[in-house]
Amino acid sequence: MEIVKRFKSKKNNVYLVKIDGEFKVLKKYSDISNFNKEKSFYDILKGENIKIPNIIKDDIKEKSILFDYIGQKTAVELIENYEVESNEDECIKLILKIYKW
């Protein structure tokens, strides 16, 4: 496994990794409660018919989850881009979409 990039995250360590020539996302949680919250949140989202990456592997001892990489920007990255571009209208639209969802 090759670490390609580290993503911004306040609570966890999140990496873009390359395994057998394919990109994946490895998320290492700071504690077991964050790991468990993420797993239960994932199950809720999966049941809502929302496009989310597949879990390839989870490891409770390592408090980590390996996801498929879907190659899209996260909501936080989009908001940061809108901030840099001073594009308040698009930022508000995105925040409202998240709120309504």
Image: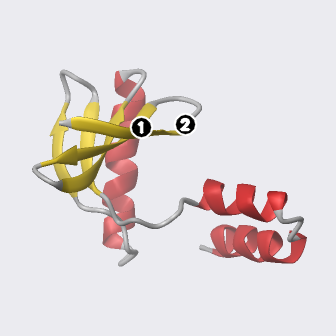
Residue at x-position 82% and y-position 71%: 92
Residue 60 % position (x, y): 20, 28
Relative vertical location of residue 42 with respect to residue 57 in this rendering, above or below: below
Circle 2 Cα neighbour tier, 10 Å, few/some/many (<14 / 14–19 / ≥20)? few
The residue that disc 2 covers is: 9
Proximity of marks 2 and 1: CB atoms separated by less than 8 Å:
yes
Mark sitting on residue 46? none
Corner quadrant of residue 100: bottom right
Callout 1: helix, strand or loop?
A: strand
Q: CA distance from mark 2 to mark 1?
A: 7 Å
Callout 2: helix, strand or loop?
A: loop
Task: Give the amino acid type for the residue marked by disc 2 in the picture.
Answer: Ser
Q: Is residue 98 left or right of residue 67?
A: right
Mark sitting on residue 14? 1
Circle 1 Cα neighbour tier, 10 Å, few/some/many (<14 / 14–19 / ≥20)? many
Residue at x-position 40% and y-position 52%: 41
Task: Give the amino acid type for the residue marked by disc 1 in the picture.
Answer: Val
The number of discs equals 2
Q: Is residue 7 left or right of residue 41?
A: right
Q: The N terminus appears in which quarter of the rendering?
A: top left
Residue 31 % position (x, y): 39, 21
Frontmost residue, 46 versus 95: 95
Residue 71 % position (x, y): 40, 65
Corner quadrant of residue 29: top left
Corner quadrant of residue 21: bottom left
Frontmost residue, 37 versus 55: 55
Q: Is residue 35 left or right of residue 67?
A: right
Residue 30 % position (x, y): 42, 22
Q: Earlier in the sequence, mark 2 or mark 1?
A: 2
Q: The C terminus appears in which quarter of the rendering?
A: bottom right
Frontmost residue, 85 versus 26: 85
Residue at x-position 89% and y-position 65%: 86
